[in-house]
Amino acid sequence: MAESDSLFEPPQAVPGDRLGAAVCAPALSDISVSFEFFPPTSDKIAEQLWNAIVRLAPLKPEFVSVTYGAGGSTRERTFDTVARIMKDTDLTPAAHLTCVGDSRGAVDDAARRYWDAGVRHVVALRGDPPEGMEKFEAPKDGYHFAADLVEGLQRVADFEISVAAYPEIHPEAKSAEADLDNLKRKIDAGASRAMTQFFFDVDLFLRFRDRAQAAGIEVTIVPGILPVTNYGRLVDFSARCGASLPDWLARLFEGLDDDPDTRRLISGWIAIEQCRRLIDQGVQNFHFYTLNRAELTRAICHALGIRAATALPEAVP
């Protein structure tokens, strides 16, 4: 099967309609989701963020994570967003922390601040270099690698710790084997979950999962799902983070630059089919990169059988 057609294989002869079963099933107790948000940089984005949180909260995600800007540029906004989620919702927040730009003492202090605020889950990342820097350089007295950060967080408090994984290897990794060794170091240091970079070729994830298991990595590897809202921006972002875009994806979005309604329909269908194939292969956990927008993520979850526990609330005024 060619890579470019991997999402569009004809249905296999199996009992029942698998996609129909996923779409029409009641809430599936064995499917778990989590959502990622980024902290607002303006009043308009803040309104968009909280509308997304209000609309997605009734789906009862396992947790919601809040990102940490390049070079720690959103440190206070990340804390404020996480604190508000703790105060104003029933959601379980996970705060991102990185190695970028701070001493070990400063990072440890930030972790203690989260712990004191009631936050028990951290997403530990090495982090992207600050704007204007081509490559990551750790501060002289800072954490150099995500595995070091995981060890440090374990000394601060008994955090639940998630880390990043890369089905197509990290852009700076010397090889796929070296990248997998780095993931194992993070797990051995105390991380209990790995969430992947977004991808669109399901077979890439499945091969990566098999290789991780063969390497002795036993924690849950959660696929990162990115609903596509703007294909042009996706191309630019993918080039920076090293994620490949299959040929069929470009063909599907061709000619839709000025047709956002059709783009959304196509995007939702792609993600639903992607999740369906993963569920067929035993995947039960999904992490959605929401981009602070609820509509597509909510629709995808609905198609997977995840139903709101309460009536849809009104948007934040």
Image: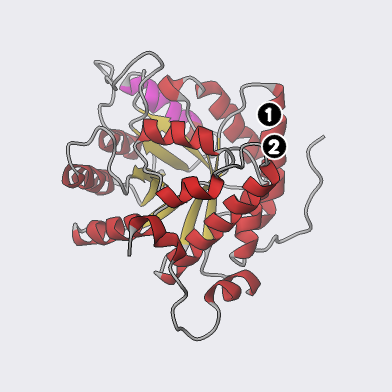
Most distant residue in the bottom direction = 15
Q: Which residue is drawn at 38% across and 25% down?
A: 107
**Region rendered in magenta:** 104-113
Counting from the top left corner in percent of width and height, residue 23 is at 62, 69
Label 1: few (<14), some or many (≥20) within 10 Å? some
Are circles 2 and 1 on residues that touch, CB within 8 Å?
yes
Counting from the top left corner in percent of width and height, residue 178 is at 17, 42
What kind of residue is marked 2? Trp
Counting from the top left corner in percent of width and height, residue 166 is at 32, 45
Secondary structure of residue under mark 1: helix
Counting from the top left corner in percent of width and height, residue 66 is at 53, 36
Kindly identify which residue carries mark 2. Answer: 50
Q: Quadrant of residue 48?
A: top right
Q: Is residue 264 magenta?
A: no
Lateral position of residue 222 relative to residue 273, left or right: left
Which of the labelled discs sits on residue 10, or is there none? none
Kindly identify which residue carries mark 1. Answer: 46
Q: Residue at x 17, y 36 (%)?
A: 174
Q: Which residue is drawn at 58% across and 50% down?
A: 267
Dominant SS in magenta: helix
Q: In which quarter of the image is residue 235?
A: top left
Q: Relative to 65, is 128 above or below?
A: above
Nearest the eye: 308 or 142: 308
